[in-house]
Image (spheres, rainbow, N blue to C red):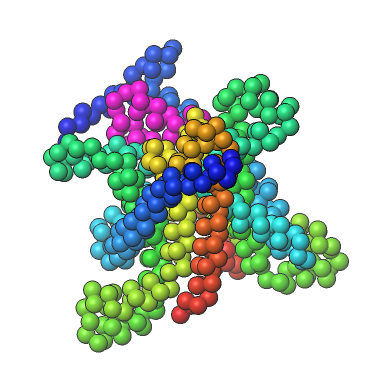
């Protein structure tokens, strides 16, 4: 192949201060992890609330949560992102819209948009996992709580939700790994996360193969590291006797 | 956007939808074929083959699809040029097709592997007892049952793939989403065209997953 390999490119100066090209990967990775974590907090909180709603008695609350899941799971992530980025700011009250468009920097604006988009997108998936976890618990758990005189809020807070979370750690782990990968759509609204920085390096240097190799390698290593870490967490928090439950 | 605008835009949008559907169908077929090969390699008992397939699956499952699309966009022409020795440019469609096939194969492989493993040992033993060889047992006994079991899951994955095809926007392929986006950009009604695209994706994905759920009930072996 007539390709000129040049692995030294990463240690060359970008021309801005003492920065070398390798630094772009680190700042990109930091942005990727920041986005994923911020989105994950939204997803976890909202997803838990929705997941609990789906298991509540009555019709209205489970239906609302169900509709949310259907909506956010059946529109492509990229389309959702563009709706948040191009459409929603125009619908917001002028004060907030102007703040997003003018007062804050474009990077901050993009960060907030992607964070909200990823959070609400992933919440639909977290919701389904929480629901599965709650439904996987033996009915006796909740009933024992009621028999002790707890009300429904207490039963969910002290008995059902904590146990459900311990069961669904493996699927939640894969959702967290997904949010890291999904955060790469941020590069399409000019946010310099890991994929964005990789592409910028491709544009600046002629070292496309090298840049993409290192970029994919970083995603790969982060994924594997988190997988092993979560496996360790999962072992420590496993509910005795419920090992086979959970999962997709 | 008035109704006249919409009716003028429709032929263009339909062209985009055709690109989306072509990419989808070809990537699903390619992904399932490669995925089946990977699953068979993984279950073959040959340590080397199994490790190669295992690495392939882990690798593609740990990197973003958007990354694969972007980097295949320039790698595929280079590799094809190297193999054929010519320097003809190939379009974004071929690069995207290769990217989606390679990526989705990793996901299909896991579904197919689980499907094959869910067939009871007795079926395999019975096939061997009848004097079948390994390939015969796979082709005539195991795979037909396994595919029946996993059809709903494969379809579900294909619905996800249908949504993911919108990512070809990154390399400028004019699929359905990118066509709507460009139309909006030209007419200055970008918001409306994005919402329209979102609604179309929603109706198709939602309808399809409802159908898969019904199928699931009928397909249970």
Q: Quadrant of the N terminus of chain A?
A: top left
Q: Is residue A200 magenta?
A: yes
Compared to residue B184, the image places residue B18 above or below, namely: below
Q: Is residue A29 visible?
A: no
Residue shown at 71%/72% (left/top)? Answer: A139
Left or right of residue A58, residue B22 in this image: left
Q: Is residue B1 visible?
A: yes
Residue shown at 30%/62% (left/top)? Answer: B33
Left or right of residue A202, residue A179 in this image: right
Residue shown at 48%/38% (left/top)? Answer: B183
Looking at the picture, how far across and down is residue A40, in whole percent? 60, 43
Q: Is residue A68 magenta?
A: no
Q: Residue furthest left?
A: B85
Instruction: Choose between A113 and A135: the one closer to the eye.
Output: A113
Looking at the picture, how far across and down is residue B180, in whole percent? 49, 42
Left or right of residue A222, residue A55 in this image: right
Dominant SS of magenta comes to helix
Compared to residue B125, the image places residue A8 above or below, namely: above
Instruction: Choose between B39 and A191: the one closer to the eye.
Output: A191
Looking at the picture, how far across and down is residue A42, in whole percent? 65, 43
Compared to residue A9, the image places residue B160 above or below, namely: below
Using the rendered view, name the quadrant where residue B78 is placed: top left
Residue shown at 61%/37% (left/top)? Answer: A87
Left or right of residue A42, residue B197 in this image: left
Span colored in magenta = A191-216
Using the rendered view, name the quadrant where residue B194 is placed: top right
Q: Residue furthest bottom?
A: B130
Looking at the picture, how far across and down is residue B174, in whole percent? 40, 42
């Amino acid at each position: 192949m007539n390709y000129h390999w040049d692995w030294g490119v990463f240690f060359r100066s970008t021309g801005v201060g003492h920065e070398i090209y390798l630094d772009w990967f680190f700042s990109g990775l930091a942005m990727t992890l920041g986005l994923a974590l911020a989105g994950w907090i939204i997803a976890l909180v909202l997803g838990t609330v929705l997941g609990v709603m789906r298991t509540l008695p009555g019709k209205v609350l489970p239906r609302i949560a169900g509709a949310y899941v259907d909506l956010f799971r059946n529109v492509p992530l990229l389309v959702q992102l563009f709706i948040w980025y191009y459409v929603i700011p125009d619908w917001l009250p002028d004060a907030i819209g102007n703040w997003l468009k003018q007062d804050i920097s474009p990077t901050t604006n993009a960060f907030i948009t992607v964070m909200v988009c990823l959070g609400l997108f992933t919440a639909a998936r977290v919701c389904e996992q929480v629901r599965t976890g709650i439904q996987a618990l033996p009915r006796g758990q909740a009933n024992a709580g009621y028999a002790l005189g707890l009300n429904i809020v207490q039963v969910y807070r002290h008995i059902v939700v904590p146990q459900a979370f311990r069961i669904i750690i493996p699927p939640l782990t894969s959702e967290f790994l997904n949010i890291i990968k999904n955060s790469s759509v941020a590069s399409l609204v000019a946010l310099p996360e890991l994929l964005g920085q990789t592409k910028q390096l491709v544009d600046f240097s002629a070292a496309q193969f090298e840049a993409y190799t290192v970029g994919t390698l970083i995603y790969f290593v982060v994924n594997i590291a988190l997988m092993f870490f979560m496996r360790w967490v999962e072992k420590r928090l496993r509910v005795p006797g419920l090992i086979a439950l959970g999962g997709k | 956007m008035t109704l006249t605008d919409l009716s003028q835009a429709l032929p263009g949008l339909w062209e985009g939808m055709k690109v989306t559907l072509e990419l989808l169908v070809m990537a699903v077929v390619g992904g399932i074929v490669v995925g089946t090969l990977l699953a068979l390699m993984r279950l073959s008992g040959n340590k080397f083959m199994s490790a190669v397939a295992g690495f392939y699956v882990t690798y593609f499952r740990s990197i973003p699809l958007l990354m694969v699309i972007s980097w295949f966009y320039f790698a595929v022409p280079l590799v094809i040029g190297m193999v054929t020795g010519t320097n003809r440019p190939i379009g974004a469609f071929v690069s995207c097709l290769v990217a989606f096939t390679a990526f989705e194969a990793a996901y299909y492989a896991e579904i197919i592997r689980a499907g094959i493993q869910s067939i009871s040992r007795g079926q395999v033993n019975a096939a061997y007892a009848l004097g079948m060889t390994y390939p015969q047992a796979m082709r005539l006994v195991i795979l037909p049952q396994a595919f029946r079991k996993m059809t709903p899951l494969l379809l579900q994955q294909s619905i996800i793939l249908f949504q993911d095809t919108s990512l070809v926007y990154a390399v400028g392929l004019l699929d359905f989403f990118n066509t709507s986006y460009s139309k909006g950009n030209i007419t200055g009604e970008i918001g409306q065209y994005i919402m329209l695209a979102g609604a179309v994706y929603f109706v198709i994905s939602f309808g399809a997953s409802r159908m898969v759920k019904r199928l699931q009930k009928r397909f249970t072996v």
